[in-house]
Amino acid sequence: MTMITKRARKSAARLNFSRPLSGLFCVLMVVFILGPLAWLGIRAFAESWTFPNLGPDGWTLRWWSVVLGDETLGRAVQNSLALAALTVLVSACICLPAAYAFARYEFWGRRTFLIGLFALNAFPKMGLYVTIASLFYALNLMSTVLGVLIVHVLGTVVFMTWIPAAAFAAVPRSLEEAARDAGASKLRVFFSVTFPLALPGILVAAVMSFLASFDEAQGSYLIGAPDIMTMPTQMYTLVLNYPNQVAAVFSILLAIPSVALLLAAHKHIVGGTLAEGFQIK
Amino acid sequence: MTLIEEIHSTTPIHRETDAGGLRGLRVRGLHKVLGGRTIIDNLDLTVRDGELVSLLGPSGCGKTTTLRMIAGFLAPDAGSIQVHDREVSDLGAEKRPSAMVFQNYALWPHMTVQNNVGFPLKLRRLGKKEIEQRVDAVLALVNLLHHKNSRPARISGGEQQRVALARALVQEPELLLLDEPLSNLDAKLRVKVREDIREIQQRLGITTLIVTHDQEEAISMSDRIAVMNAGKIEQFSRPAELYSRPETEFVATFIGSLNRIEGALVNGVIVPGDDVVGIRPEDVVFTLHASFDARPAVVERVVPHGHFHEIYLKRDDATLRAFASGLPPAPGDRGHASIQNALTFRQGRLVTTTRVTA
Ligand SMILES: Nc1ncnc2c1ncn2[C@@H]1O[C@H](COP(=O)(O)OP(=O)(O)OP(=O)(O)O)[C@@H](O)[C@H]1O
Ligand SMILES: [Mg+2]
């Protein structure tokens, strides 16, 4: 009897204790995630912000006009969007067949390849780019679209291989066999069954690759600047030449495509018809 | 009076009577080694035109492997597979005239029921109108027209099973293959669906091979049953014959229930010997009063099975299990037990059947 009540009281105590703790945790999370964003938002409209003051000294849209008035910016946006789209396309063409092979076939060196892909990302990026740059000098690829594209594709290989490989592997073999049994050729099986069922995973990989390419700054700067400027590399230039409110404005602009893409993808991947297929095993 | 029948079993284990023509399925010398083990060992199997044959055996005996080789998903190491007099063992699964119903149904989740069933016809490049007509016809056959536009995930297990069947039937295959088609259904539904399958199979006269490990299912559906063990077919015969005249000890123990006693049966009494005597529990009769060739017995244990009871009877020569319906005796009750029928096996093969008649 006493044991039971004691235990009950103990768990009640734990409950009372854990509730404020988790509340505190939530607040901390919000501050950590939204704090910098809020700061960024305020900063983008601030006249100036001197140290002891809690708020900015005044409000202005000047920084926005500086950024939007910069004619190089338009080009940078175009470059970035086109490059990201091209990167996803090229990366998909190279990586998706590899992903399918990793998922469906046993071959020599399969594991080594998969781990090796991670190793590629584990390298300090700058070291890799410097090595690539010296190679590109020799190949006359510096300051060319192809050079920048290669660097961007390299950065997306891991996403475009691992995530689709998992998606392909998750397609039950019996679904493919059923299509073969129905009379479909191997190619037809892939396009009618395997690919549509792996599509959500492939879309996730495409979105991540797009964002990775969109945010890529170091390699693009090293290989492409000053002839090929993307939004992130343009930002280096702007930030160096203007007060740091401009950086805030630019960060917000840079985030818009990412957020838009994530929202669009979310609708398709989580809530849309693609998710429906996965209720059945 | 005791009547003993001698069986001269020098004939091969399974007898085949090809009905003249070569329509249907004919498998010869099928062999498969997997992971260093012989999984299918020189297997022969014939399914006559329009016949429903069950491949019945314990888990791991190679039923699925056999079916997958016939369907074309697995290449045999040796042997020939003929469907309607045409060698198919070199063809890929997509070129074979067989259609398969998968154990997990393998419906494509991103297509509606209608598109699932229509997919094989789309591959055959039939016109839109014809596809729709044939899909409607086959969906009507399996009673699923109302779910035409549903996704597989939204319909019940029994309905998914019927969609899978419809998808196979719409191809008008020369051979229908089913791998444990009922194992994912609950007990009640299983009985209904197996009757449905049998009814449709007979109506269409479609040559069918079903893999199952459920003997009740096999016995109730099949024209003939091939009992499989360790990659070989032990016996291939009609369900009733399988039960009353099992050719091997394995078949006798696998089909139904059996008292297996080492020794020999002489005048209704078990005596020591090198053979194996098999007695069906329903052939052991327990009475309270003495009777012709019954021996005194004590009830040791009573196990209820719903509509009948299983009674363990201790006689001075052996302990026997008997089935009894009606009011069961209680443990400790004394009475008399007699053996009505028995099978004698030597080295695993049936040598005699003994019928005791009063
Ligand atoms: N790829 C493989 N490599 C090695 N052994 C295999 C392979 N595939 C199947 N086996 C073995 O072959 C044997 C027969 O398998 P199979 O799936 O045909 O059995 P089954 O009769 O269908 O059994 P169940 O009733 O459990 O489905 C099993 O012992 C299995 O372990
Ligand atoms: Mg099996």
Image (spheres, rainbow, N blue to C red):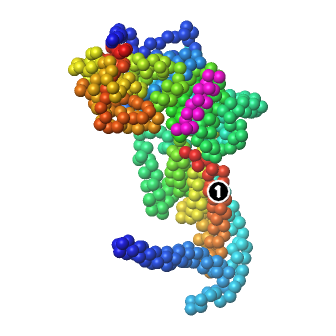
Any atom of ligand 2 within 8 Å of the CB at mark 1?
no
Question: Picture quarter containing residue B98?
Answer: top right
Quadrant (top left, top right, bottom left, bottom right) of the N terminus of chain A: bottom left
Q: Residue at x 66, y 83 (%)?
A: A46
Q: Residue at x 55, y 35 (%)?
A: B190
Considering only vertical position in the picture, is A65 above or below A217?
Answer: below
Picture coordinates of residue B15 (x, y %)? 44, 13
Picture coordinates of residue A181 (x, y %)? 58, 30
Picture coordinates of residue B19 (x, y %)? 54, 10
Q: Relative to B31, is A28 on the left or the right?
A: right
Q: Relative to B245, is A53 on the left or the right?
A: right
Determine the chain carrying the residue at label 1. Answer: A
Q: Is residue B42 visible to us here?
A: no
Disc 1 residue crowd, few under 14, some 14–19, many 20+, Cα 10 Å: few
Question: Picture quarter containing residue A74?
Answer: bottom right
Give the magenta range. B187-203
Task: Please tell me which residue lies in front, A165 or B187.
Answer: B187
Q: Secondary structure at mark 1?
A: helix
Picture coordinates of residue A123 (x, y %)? 44, 59
Considering only vertical position in the picture, is B307 above or below A4?
Answer: above
Residue, disc 1: A271
Farthest residue to the front: give it: B289
Task: Please tell me which residue lies in front, A72 or B200.
Answer: B200
Task: Please tell me which residue lies in front, B194 or A45.
Answer: B194
Q: Relative to B21, is B79 on the left or the right?
A: left
Q: Relative to B311, is A67 on the left or the right?
A: right
Q: Name the kind of residue labelled 1 in the image.
A: Gly
Q: Is residue B54 visible to us here?
A: yes
